[in-house]
Image (cartoon, helix red, strand yellow):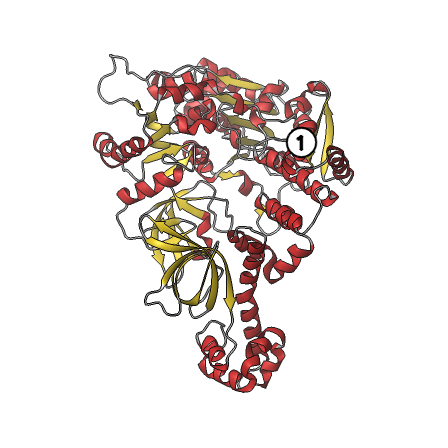
Amino acid sequence: MITLKGHLESITYYNEENHYTIAKLRMRNTKTPVTVVGYMAEAMPGETLKIQGSWETHSKYGRQFKIDSFEITLPSTVDGIKKYLKSGIIKGIGPKTADRMVTRFKEKTLEIIEDDPKRLLEIEGIGKATATRISKAWKGHHAVKNLMQFLQEYGLNASYSAKIFQEYGRNAVNIISSDPFRLANDIPGAGFYIADTIALKSGTPKNEPQRVKACLIHLTQQSSNDGHIFIYEQELLKRCTNLFQVDPNTAKDALNALAGSGQIVIETLTSDQGARVVYPKILHEAETGVANRLKALLSVPVTSPGIDPEHITAEVLKKLAIKLSSEQLKVLDKILSHRVAIITGGPGTGKTTLIRSVNAVFEAFGKDILLAAPTGRAARRLSEVTLRKAATIHKLLGYNLTTEAFEKNQDNPLDADAVIIDEASMVDTSLMFHLLKAVPMTSVLIIVGDAFQLPSVGPGNVLSDMIESGVIPVFYLKKIYRQAQESPIVVNAHMVRRGEFPMLERPDKHKGLSEFYFIEQSNPHQVVETIVELCTNRIPKRFNLDPVKEIQVLTPMHKGEVGVINLNQVLQKVLNTSPVLMESMGNTFKQGDKVMHLKNNYQKEVFNGDIGTIRSIDKAESQLSVDYYGRTVKYNFDELNEISPAYAISVHKSQGSEYPAVIVPIMTQHFVLLQRNLLYTAMTRGKELVILIGTRKALNIALKNDKPRQRLSSLADRLKAR
């Protein structure tokens, strides 16, 4: 380990979210400053630092020093302290105030600011408010640095400090020193590993009960993150023993203690040869709640509307100018006599037409209808096709950001005669539970979705489980209508759905431009070059589509040459030649960039997966403005972790959306994520053009891999049980 000492001359780049810094360090007896890079919390020019790390050579920027740890060396002489305070490092202390403080306290000035700030009142011009402000500024300036140094002492990545400081504030070091496993609960995922590292290096035994409980909770959270509602008890205990070197009997005792305290629930599945399974308490409550609420709804009789098929046909024809097929009419007639019903089918089978028709018939009866979908873009699309107001499920239920609770529930239900939920495959177990609690027992609930698409991001496989249970009326739309029959996108999507190899060659009878292409290419670098050529030249010229607004690249992975991160960097360079105006979390932003919002923000009314265009970046105001569907949303620079470039996005993020053209790289490098339902979901996002780029081998792998649809849940069994 090499140590450098010097003063910080300037900061080239600083990321406020994770404190990643690129700076110039001026060392004694050197002509030019050294470039240092790494995590360094709120370092200020003028500070004297001792940095430990190693030299490395960057392909673009040359020789630089990579920071492993750093330490601030505070000045000890009167002149040094005066210079330090005059630099503006501590807000509230100007040059004149600094002179007076050092004249009064001399070498003890910094010690008094740190330990006895009340004495600052002895200085002319400093009152209580100013003294308090100086004290807070000093502590705030040093608290993150102390936390970062604390983590580095335990060999932990300093980038974690920002998230921990955000959670605990200035007392972070004291909190995690006294109870490191608080991190496991308060910062899911990384928090456990930080806590475990600190605990073990502090001498905590591997079989200490608190540690073992934290290990078990962490493993159940991991299982939930993978989409499962429960984990098999034996598998959980085995992982705990193997991954964390815990004694099997100790693990078993800790698991029983967690069950006794109500943090987890252990059940025996009679449908699975009496296997014992472990649920996180919140997911057990949600799954049992979904089952019980659906059973309750199904038990309420529905009064038949007494309308004949001819009347239904007439109403739909009058309101929509649509003549229903015999299949659609049969489904529509039967739906009206059920309290809960599911409509499912692939692309081109008329789900949208049926939703519009249900609306028309209910309106003819004077019924109040509510329409909703899981995401903002899916709700917008539902509104566009029905010409009626549609909301996200969260907005429908009145989600309160402050309380993190829903205003609508069993005590304050929705005011509706019918509730229609579209894109239901995206609804996870917890959200479905909250929705069902708010649906009144007098209402009709119609759930629409394609069960073969990717399951929800959150735990569960609700739509598939509801269908599998056999207790809810399900209406399968199988007929592909004439216009869709002629679409190679629709035909190939249905082939993929059945596990059949798609038609990669066009039939001779089709002339002109096709809607579906497969470009065989095995080299990742050439795949990227082909995607660039398609976006910048071939598709815009031949199909007259806007390369930014109408072409969407969908890829299974985030990392790698054909992953989201690299493709965005490459496409941004060629599709937007404006200068870079802002950097955040490894992303660069330019005016005119295509960006995606990454998580629901109910205050801004912008939702996970919404795509917009950067209209302005104002460095003076530290604000960035994005146009979403004609509405401008402003982000402060410290909120830029909520957006990312969207020239390329993951297939999961595309759910509920449609694009004029999609390009999908499908490579053997994506092996872990090559799934049939992922390929199917990607293909069905394209309305006018779908282009697959990759290898036939990768296509075959995806078609044969149907296992990811099997998530661990017991909803179907709960619905079947009496």
Give the camera-side residue of 312 and 554: 554
Judge whether residue 323 can be spotted in this image: no
Residue at image position (47%, 38%) is: 389
User: Which picture quadrant has residue 247?
Assistant: top right
- Disc 1: CA contacts within 10 A as few (<14), some (14-19) or many (>=20): many
Q: Where residue 380 sits in the image (x, y, percent)? A: 44, 38
User: Which picture quadrant has residue 445?
Assistant: top right
Judge whether residue 34 can be spotted in this image: yes
Q: Where residue 613 sits in the image (x, y, percent)? A: 35, 46
Q: Where residue 418 sits in the image (x, y, percent)? A: 57, 31
Residue at mark 1: 236
Residue at image position (74%, 43%) is: 209
Name which residue type carries label 1: Leu
Q: Where residue 283 sits in the image (x, y, percent)? A: 65, 35
Quadrant of the snapshot with the C terminus: top right
> In the figure, 684 relative to 63: above or below?
above
Q: Secondary structure at mark 1?
A: helix
Give the camera-side residue of 419 and 206: 206
Give the camera-side residue of 443 and 162: 162
Left or right: 450 as drawn, with respect to 576: right
Q: How many marks?
A: 1
